[in-house]
Amino acid sequence: MPDVSHILVVAPNFKRRLSGVTSTIVQLVPKQAETIAIATLGPGLPDHLPKLHWLDLPKLRRRPKGRRFRVWHARRNVEMLAGVVMRDLLRMPLKLLFTSAAQRHHTGWTRFLISRMDGVVATSERSRSYLKAPARVVMHGIDCESFSPDGPMPSGDLAASLEGRRIVGCSGRIRHQKGTDLFVEAMIALLPSHPDWTAVITGRVTAENRAFATDLEGRIAAAGLKERILFAGEVDDIAAWFRRFDLYVAPPRNEGFGLTPLEAMASRTPVVASDAGAFAELIVEGVTGRVVPAGDAGALASAIAPFLSDETMRLAAGTAGLEHVRAKFPLEREAMQLGAVYEALWTSTP
């Protein structure tokens, strides 16, 4: 357990269930901890992260060593509220920072909380456009060692059955928001003309989305493609599947940020994605992949089709994507830019 007196940044995580925010904290904090005294606070986080316990909260009343205050880096409303209470009511020496990935107009309550922040970060230009407060854009990065062309391929019966096949992949929870049905519709349209390709969908089905998944399975069976559009379920090593995919498709109707296109490109896999989340800011159109209107299965199929037919195009896009991610989106860049935001807060007037 870290010494609270030395902790300069607290990254709260007040949600036990795994989410994109939690995943960001899990990946980012270890990289930040290499250069800054940071600790997490909250449930559902792995043991390897530097953590504070709830009983440590009263210790935040004391200034950290070497600084006038700590940075409380919130990513949810409840975490902003906790920071406001601690700073304004309990008079703890804190500066409050909020990171917003939302791509929608905020509620009045959220706008009020944001107005109480000392600093705001947006994860994309699109996210920043919905904010009423000044914000700096710090886009997410990924671990380019974990996601790379080099490493193990998937193992198990499913992977073995696909040996020698071309694979177009789609990853994420099976639900309407994620556009799984749009991917299935595109595959039903395309696969009969491309007999050497198989579609693989990774991701779990929650109880509330079981009927949605069952309907998709019925549509696939009716098209005679049960052996070529496969549901892999939740996989142990998604990085291995990104290496195995020959093309990756990200079809969400809406998204906060969306890391999977970066993870695919870092694996030298070209991407076709909807214009959701930050995808249009991650993909170099016509170079590392394609971006199509969200919710349009026909446009999705039209963008996918050339990649299934043209290996030279596919390989060129994969190589360009790998170079693009390594140059623009390493996790180290995100950690460095957030460090600059913290420094600006520390050097600002009280």
Image: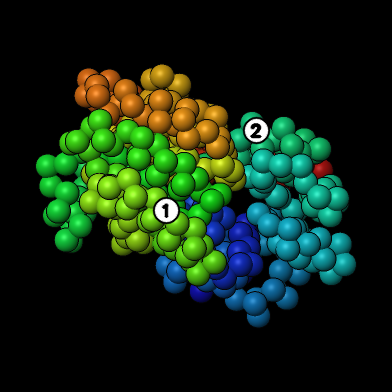
Q: What label sits on residue 338 in the rendered view?
A: none
- Report how many numbered discs are placed on residues in the image: 2
Tell which residue pokes out farthest to the bottom in this image: 55
Question: Residue at horizontal 14%, vertical 53%?
Answer: 161
Q: Amino acid at mark 2?
A: Arg
- Circle 2 Cα neighbour tier, 10 Å, few/some/many (<14 / 14–19 / ≥20): many
Q: Please give the residue where the numbered disc 1 appears in the rendered image.
A: 216
- Circle 1 Cα neighbour tier, 10 Å, few/some/many (<14 / 14–19 / ≥20): some
Q: Please give the residue where the numbered disc 2 appears in the rendered image.
A: 126
Q: Position of residue 106 (x, y in %)?
A: 77, 46
Tell me which corner region of the image, top left, top right, bottom left or bottom right, holds residue 54: bottom right
Question: Residue at horizontal 34%, vertical 50%?
Answer: 222
Q: Position of residue 283 (x, y in %)?
A: 46, 28
Residue 10 or 20: which is nearer the viewer? 20
Mark 2, secondary structure of its residue: helix
Give the Cα separation between the discs numbered 2 and 1: 31 Å
Can you tell which of label 2 and label 1 is closer to the viewer? Answer: 1
Q: Position of residue 102 (x, y in %)?
A: 66, 45
